[in-house]
Image (cartoon, helix red, strand yellow):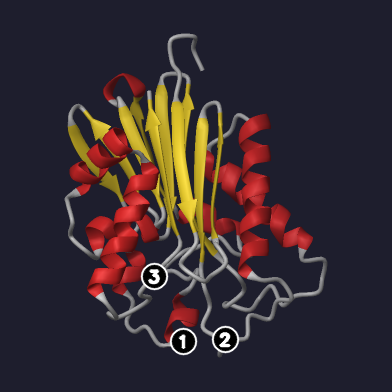
Amino acid sequence: MTGASRMQVTCATEAAPGAVNEDFVVAGPSWVVVLDGATAPAVVDSGCVHDVPWLVRNLAAGLATNLALRDEPLADVLASAIERVRAEHLGNCDLGNPSSPSSTVSMLRLRADVVEYLVLADSPVLLDVGGAVRAVVDDRLDHLPGYDVETVAACRNQPGGFWVASTDPDAAFEAVRGSVAVSEVPRAAVLSDGASRYVERFGLSDWAGLLDLLDSAGPGELLSRVRAAEVSAGQQRGKRHDDATAALIRF
């Protein structure tokens, strides 16, 4: 990172009411990571003695270590972290089970004068590029042939399906990745889908409006407005409440 380039991160995370937070956010001087653990239906046998929060915490620790100590592409950073978590299962778990605990991963890093990003599954990154807000999304989960337990399991970490961080390090190389000059990006955001539902589920603004809200009122206000929208909307398809995490980055 050059002396002229710096980043400031402001973040907030909140569990769904009455639940354990399966999101995780971690940041360093030049990077930020948001994870969103996948809550498995009670009927699913994961083949694993560990729960989703365990996976998320350990994956976050591996990513933070790699980002702090290694200068390598983000996909390699993630692949190494997945491999590290895989080793932590210590032979007690069925690592071939497609329903093994998993998580989305979204990362943003300032490297020299370039902002790099990686998005794996449905936790978006927002980039304000030249005054136009660009949403980096991985929407493969929205295009499955079905959403019953068996179909989702068969499509997880498979070509033509969708990809998440679980037990297969190669999933890292299926992530949506790219970069943009930091001179073009005054601000950005990294969100879990519990925060991005402000736009995607409730339609309370567009992506530019969400980023403006983060910039003017902070991530905590975004999460408060999401909670209010969840209550007002009542029961809809899918989870009424979700863990929510938002990180605002200024360059």
Disc nearer the start of the sequence (1/3): 1
* Residue 30 located left or right of residue 87: left
- Marks 1, 3: nearer the viewer: 3
Q: Which residue is mark 2?
A: 44
Q: Residue at 55% of width from left, 62% of height from top? A: 21
Labelled pair 1, 2 in contact (Cβ < 8 Å): yes
Secondary structure under badge 1? Answer: helix
How crowded pointer 3 is (Cα within 10 Å; few <14, some 14-19, many 20+) is rated as some
Labelled pair 1, 3 in contact (Cβ < 8 Å): no
Indicate the amino acid at tag 3: His
**Vertical arrangement, residue 11 with respect to residue 160, above or below:** above
Indicate the amino acid at tag 1: Val
Q: Which residue is mark 1?
A: 149
* Residue 31 located left or right of residue 197: right
Secondary structure under badge 2? Answer: loop
Tell me where residue 40 appears, x and y as whole percent: 53, 78
**Vertical arrangement, residue 205 with respect to residue 186, above or below:** below
How crowded pointer 2 is (Cα within 10 Å; few <14, some 14-19, many 20+) is rated as few
Q: Residue at 58% of width from left, 33% of height from top? A: 72
CA–CA distance in space, label 1 to label 3: 20 Å
Residue 232 shows in the view = yes
CA–CA distance in space, label 1 to label 2: 8 Å
CA–CA distance in space, label 3 to label 2: 21 Å
Secondary structure under badge 3? Answer: loop
User: For this rendering, which residue is in front, 10 or 129?
Assistant: 10
Q: Which residue is mark 3?
A: 241
Tell me where residue 96 appears, x and y as whole percent: 66, 76
Q: Residue at 60% of width from left, 50% of height from top? A: 79
The C terminus lies in which quarter of the figure? top left
Tell me where residue 166 appears, x and y as whole percent: 59, 64
Indicate the amino acid at tag 2: Val
Disc nearer the start of the sequence (3/2): 2
